[in-house]
Image (cartoon, grey):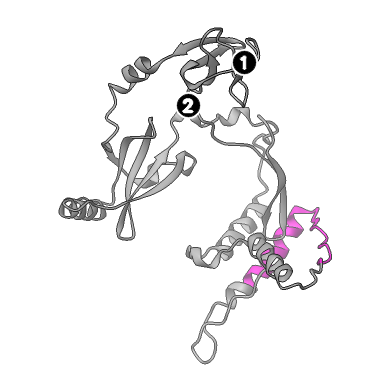
Amino acid sequence: MHTMWKGSISFGLVNIPIKMFAATEEKDIRFRYLHKECHTPLQYKKTCPTCNKEISEAEIVRGYEYELGHFIIIDEKDFAAAKSEIDDQTISILDFVNLSEIDPIYFDKTYYLAPQDTGGRAYNLLRQAMNDTGKIAIAKVTIRTKQTLAVLRVYKNVLVLETLFYPDEVRPISQIPGLPEETKINEKELEIATKLIDNLSAPFEPQKYKDDYREALQDIINKKIAGQEVKVAPNIPPKNVIDLMEALQASLKVTKKNKAGKTKNKDGEKTKQPSIV
């Protein structure tokens, strides 16, 4: 597997260096444009390097490269035959399941669903029934000729469709190099790590998270538009805590103070939680 990114996971003052890999891969059948006469792949300008001439749209066919340099030709009849078994106008619900049963690794894209003019009553009925039962629907849907697995669920006051990767599109973790083997955990370290997680636990409030890089870049753009000089901030030295127990204990101490800051002050108002540095 190809390494996409290298960095670390910051856990309080603990930094865990990591490499990142793509967890999923597309399984679409892909085609290349070929010259109809000799089946040579066309260049960007739609010219055939073998016949040394520019090719018109009428001369182009689609081929599937099953081996390097070897193609089978797929024509419109083949696409029609494959499509004849698929209803591309319907979201077909297959099962109702609990959301907790689906690992987030399967989720791909999200779409809002709204009723058409005559569908309001049935839309509301399904939305309310799913709300009352706490279930989500497993469905199949065809979008742009691709049939995909999906879930249908209620988000706030709207039904949403979230496409899923098929199981064979999720890369097996056995392909990830360098995963540490299971070793005996230090019970004291585990106890402190558990307390650290508890101290850092909070309700999910998406509005408090922001893209710091995008905001900083937008600020630079605005300054340049205004003709201002852009100053480069000094580099912040990376944290390098070698001793795991020391890092855990220091993190626990900081988060205890922050957690205490959430409690009500003498006037009965909640104090603002300081940021962890």
Work out whether residue 33 or residue 178 is closer to the camera in this orientation and state it: 33
Residue at the image position 43 percent from the left and 31 percent from the top:
166
Which residue, given by chain and number where applicable, does mark 1 sit on?
A: 53
Q: What kind of residue is marked 2?
A: Asp
Work out whether residue 175 or residue 231 is closer to the camera in this orientation and state it: 231
Q: What kind of residue is marked 1?
A: Lys
Residue at the image position 44 percent from the left and 14 percent from the top:
74
Q: Which mark is residue 28?
A: 2
Q: Which mark is residue 42?
A: none
How busy is the neighbourhood of tag 2: few (under 14 within 10 Å), some, or many (20 plus)?
few
Q: Which residues are magenta?
A: 232-256
Give the position of the N terminus as an image quadrant.
top right
Image spot of residue 18 (x, y percent): 70, 44
Residue at the image position 84 percent from the left and 66 percent from the top:
234
Let me know if residue 135 is in the magenta part: no
Name the secondary structure under disc 1: strand
